[in-house]
Structure formats: C-alpha cells, structure tokens
Amino acid sequence: MRATLIYGAGDVRVEDVPDPHVQQPTDAVVRVVVSCVCGSDLWPYASRPATEDADRIGHEFLGVVEETGSQVSGLEPGDLVVAPFVWSDNTCDFCSEGLQTSCRNGGFWGADGVDGGQGEAVRVPQAQGTLVKLPVGEDSALLPSLLTLSDVFPTGHHCAVRAGVGERTTVTVIGDGAVGLSAVLAARRLGAERIVLMGRHADRTDLGRAFGATDVVTERGEEGVEKVRELTGGDGTHTVLECVGLEQAVNTAFGVVRDGGTVSRVGAPQYEQVSMGFPQFFKNITLTGGVAPARAYIEELLPDILEGRVEPGRVFDRTVGLDEVPDGYRAMADRQALKVLIRP
C-alpha cells in the first residue's frame, strides 16, 4: 500500500510500504477513507533531524473495517469507524476514568511498528476499545465533521470542559487555528454567554464568528489584554482557552482571565515553563488542561454532528489526494491552509 513517511524537516514522502494485516487477536485492519494533517504534525515537519530511515506519520483517520482479529467483537468488515488519535483498550482503570490517553495497554499511531493514519490502510491494535462505529456510509457528506472526532473537536471540547465552561460563563479563546476554532464551537455548545476569540487571520476569525464567537480581538500582547479587559468591563473572562500557542499566549491568558478564573491549555505543548508568580496566586487563578482523551468524548459529541447541530468539519479548507500530501504539509506550514483533508 501507499503511506506517508517523514524523513526529516520539510521531507515528507508518500511511498510503498507493507500491507497491514492482523497480527494480534485484538487487531483490526481499516481501509482509510479520509484522514488529515494535524497542526502537531508540523512540529516534526519543522524540526525532525534527517535520517535514512523514515517514520510513519498521521494520527487522525476514519475508514472501513476490512478484517478483525478473533477477539474483536462488535465490529464487522464493512463497518465505517473513526479512530481517536491514540489507541486504547477502553477497559483498564485509566480508560474507565476517561483517561484513554493513559491506557495501560495503549499507544500511538506511527510508533512501535503501528501504522500511521496518513495512508491507504491501518492496522489498529486494541480495535474493540479504540474504534467507534459510525451510522453513516462512506459517501456521507458528514465525513469531514466526523473525522474531527479523531482529535481536533474533542481537543477543543476538552479545553472547555477542563476550564469549566458552562451557561453564563464568559470565555476568551487564544488562537485561531483548528483547535482554537474547535474550542469556540465547544464553548458555544456548552452554553457560554460570551466568547472572545483572539486571532489575526480574518478568514479564520470569520469562521470563529460562525462557530459562536461574539467578539474578535486582533491585537496581541498588552494591547490584546487591554482590549479584552475593555470588552469585559475591566474584569476579564471567567475562563481562557489557550489553544496551542507559544509562551506569549499563556502570558496573555493570565492577563485576560478574571480573578478566580481558570486558564485551560491544550494541544502539543510549545513551551516548558509557565510563570505563575504572586500576581496569579493572589488572584486565585487556576491553570489546567492537558492532552485530550478523545475516545472519552466521541459518543457525547457524535449526535450533534449527526443531527447537524454542529459542523466542525468546516475547519478543513483544502483537500488533497494521498500523493499530494507533501503539498498539503507545505500549505499548512506556509499558512496557506488551515487544515488539510486527505482522501486516499
């Protein structure tokens, strides 16, 4: 089959690799119908040291079950399924607590001999716990939105949940990438009273308004902080959703959060140090967030997509075939595309 491999920074290729097959009785083989490029894929694309041996890449995909191992129940060949961005048994103690990202028997796509999602097919370990069956056909117009259940929509939702967003909550979302826009959508879905989106790209912030943002702040740094404070009568917002920014983003978050409020941080961390000194301590500010256990949220979010109440697939603004994946990476890295959909 054909699959995407990364050899080094800026060096993504689509090559022939061995066809996947069932290796363990808990495996399934899934033919990929749609996958995508994640913003977190851009970090190795920007910095991975060049090597002769490549790594598989891609962790978001939706497809059709082709084969199942002897211990897999509830899934049959022909089922359309979505896979979260980590695989898990969905039965261990951590999974039972809604932390499938900490599964004792789980792992990551594209690592330790497991296929990446940006290819024609994937061997899925712990298939029964990982895959979620979808009640639509592979020609459904809902596929882009259903694909977001792999990662980006649950990540935005996790950010909002960890922050405690609910009815009558005011929210600032920092970042107009796919995660930030998903966080806007999630905050609106959870009943937020006011949603301020901080972003500078008009096409993205326009989509943010369509997703539920009530205000857009284009200024950054102290100017941005002052603008949010002005919009909120000087207090700031109850919650701040920091969506895959650099260190300046969390500093801005502390600047716009209301006393007693919560800053929630998600996405692949781009900074190791967080300055929480006396000012934040004195204001009783909480910092939370973390990696999103997407598998824990799929059943909750799925009905709203199926019934048309939300359309998170609108974050995809470019579609490529498998052989065009390197072009998709370049487009996202050059900010010519928000999020790239792949149709093998």
Image (cartoon, grey):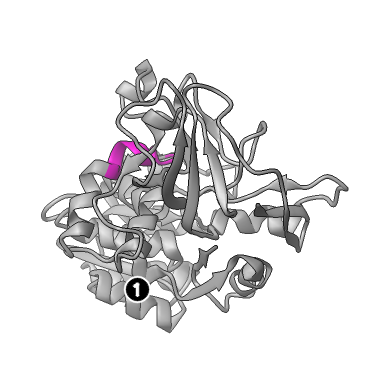
Return the x and y of residue 254 as percentages of the image width and height: 40, 52
| Relative horizontal placement of residue 54, taking residue 139 as reference (left or right) | right
Q: Residue at x 66, y 68 (%)?
A: 323
Q: Residue at x 61, y 70 (%)?
A: 328
Residue that protrudes farthest toward the bottom in the picture = 202
The part of the image, by quadrant, that contains residue 107 is top right
Asked if residue 183 can be seen in this view, the reply is yes
| Relative horizontal placement of residue 6, taking residue 119 as reference (left or right) | right
Would you say residue 292 sits in the magenta stretch? Answer: yes
Q: Residue at x 24, y 57 (%)?
A: 187
Residue that protrudes farthest toward the right in the picture = 52
Of 1 and 329, the residue lying toward us: 1
Of 91 and 249, the residue lying toward us: 91
| Relative horizontal placement of residue 306, taking residue 5 as reference (left or right) | left
The residue carrying mark 1 is: 227
Q: What's drawn in magenta, residue-wise? A: 290-298
User: Hey, what amino acid is under mark 1?
Assistant: Lys
The part of the image, by quadrant, that contains residue 186 is bottom left
